[in-house]
Amino acid sequence: MSISIQFLGAAGCVTGSQFLVTAGDRRVLVDCGMFQGSPEEVERNHLPFAFEADALDAAILTHAHLDHCGRLPALVKAGFRGPIHGTHATADLAEIVLRDSAKLQVEFTDRWNRRHARDAEKATAAAATEATARETDDESFPERLRNAPPEGRTYTRAPLYDEADVEATMQQFRGADYGAEIAVTDGVTAVLHDAGHILGSAIVELRVTDGAEPRTIIFSGDLGRDGSPILRDPTPISHADHVVVESTYGNREHDPHDQAIEELVAAITEVSTDEGVLLVPAFAIGRTQEVIWVLDELVRDGRIPRVPLYLDSPMASRATTVYHDHPETYDEETAALLRSGDSPLEYPGQQFTDTVEASRSIRHAKRPIMVVASSGMLTGGRIMHHLKDFLPDPKCTLLFIGYQGEGTLGRRLQDGGRTARIDGQEIDVRCRVRSISGFSAHADQHELETWLGHFGADGRPKTVFIVHGDPDAAEAFAARIRSGLGMEAVIPKHRETVTLT
């Protein structure tokens, strides 16, 4: 009997985390995330699963970011009825993320169907007009006409899932503490260790018995950074037979944290002097809470003026409540602040905007102001109408503090793009565009290598599989592992199955 891993997502790209572990007739899925980024990547979410959902024994979730949990309701919709294991905080955050995603899925599908219905009607009318002039199988016949749907038919698409599917999914969650042994299925146990990435994020230690000696497979999930605010540092692991490790920043190192703070202070001071707007795209879970923590500290220390802060993300508001509910995950510095009566998750006078109307009214607010809004990679959400308002304004600053995926508007603007197409409108970019890498929630190349270096001579993995990275980042990190640590590093291909020997 053999053990295998099939790499069904985050292989050759950053998002879509999904790894199927098979041992005989037992099947366990680690993560079930959405692909994000370019339209081509997003379209992969609509492909069928590579396995029978009802044959899956269990799923394990590393954390609650959409690219790790976003397809779980689709999995349940397809027939999966087993338990979904994760930390208690991950379960709480996943409910927020998945309910929001379900709403967006329905809205997106409705827009998609309306647009394609209009296109189909136009194509059908054009085909009827020109059919007398040309045969539809003529190679010179326009492609758009040869592909027109039969008369009376239009193309329709169902949403990936809706809120009822999320409700069913949440019934299958099983919360666990860090360090507790989880009986996943016959001959398979798991232990979750703190990954330090976002609240509740976990490194998965999976122990699989195939009739002989047990094998230990470590899935890093997304690893956080040493010394980041709020959360503890990633847990060092010393033994594994095989390791599946992320490589989002596998080819670069972040700026020192002190430098990142100085750059943030400079950006706020600049906007304050100009009476402008500091617009910060941030993921609602993780980055937003860290930004609040840092801004609160800077105000307390007198390093920045008390510029009004708008937190324009209902999801971020709900996620911050979950952060308050799980102090057991905090590092000692944050725990000490809470014991002293200070809340490091609140900025003086911060304003949450709960409605779209309140969000749009920010454009009329007395300046200077700071606005933190999602999505973090400019792929949708409330940030989009802020971009239309503030990109053309030279007194405004667009400040990136997190990873921008290939093919996203965020990456294009970060790389110097001077226009942005939003809702069919071409917007000139006249504002300042800045990037600060020191606030990333992902370990950089050096930190990833240091984490892998904790595997001692007695616990050295036979293979390190490199995932969650763009091709250049994965290749660079694989080379670093081979030369610096002397470990075998493999970059699996999408849908590749590897038998563990």
Image (spheres, rainbow, N blue to C red):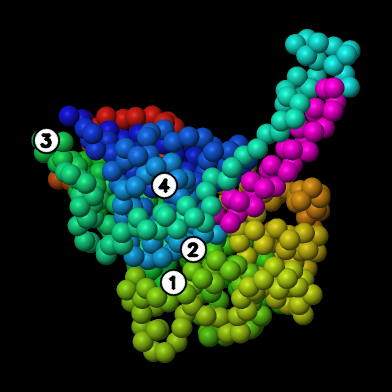
Q: Earlier in the sequence, mark 2 or mark 1?
A: 2
Q: Where is residue 358 in the image (x, y as percent from the top left)?
A: 71, 73
Q: Tell which residue pokes out farthest to the left in this image.
A: 212
Residue on which the image places disc 4: 76
Q: Quadrant of residue 357?
A: bottom right
Q: Is mark 1 on a helix, strand or loop?
A: helix
Q: Specify few, some or many for label 3: CA neighbours under 10 Å numbering under 14, 14-19, or 20 or more.
A: few
Q: In which quarter of the image is residue 442?
A: bottom left
Judge from the rendering whether residue 192 lies leftward or rightward of residue 74; answer left or right: left
Callout 1 amino acid: Val
Residue 463 shows in this picture = no
Residue stretch rendered in magenta on the structure: 101-128
Callout 4 amino acid: Val
User: Label 1 near label 2: C-beta < 8 Å?
Assistant: yes
User: Label 1 near label 4: C-beta < 8 Å?
Assistant: no
Q: Residue 96 carries which label?
A: 2
> Split into 4 quadrants, where in the image is the C terminus?
top left
Residue at (45%, 61%) from the top-left corner? 95
Q: Residue 52 carries which label?
A: none
User: Label 3 near label 1: C-beta < 8 Å?
Assistant: no
Q: Where is residue 472 in the image (x, y as percent from the top left)?
A: 50, 37
User: Label 4 near label 3: C-beta < 8 Å?
Assistant: no
Predominant SS along the magenta part? helix
Residue nearest the viewer, comparing 336 with 80 = 80
Q: Which of marks 3 and 4 is nearer the N terminus?
A: 4
Residue on which the image places disc 3: 211
Q: Nearer the viewer, mark 2 or mark 1?
A: 2
Residue on which the image places disc 1: 322
Work out how far the residue at label 2 is from the one at label 3, CA to CA, in angstroms: 40 Å
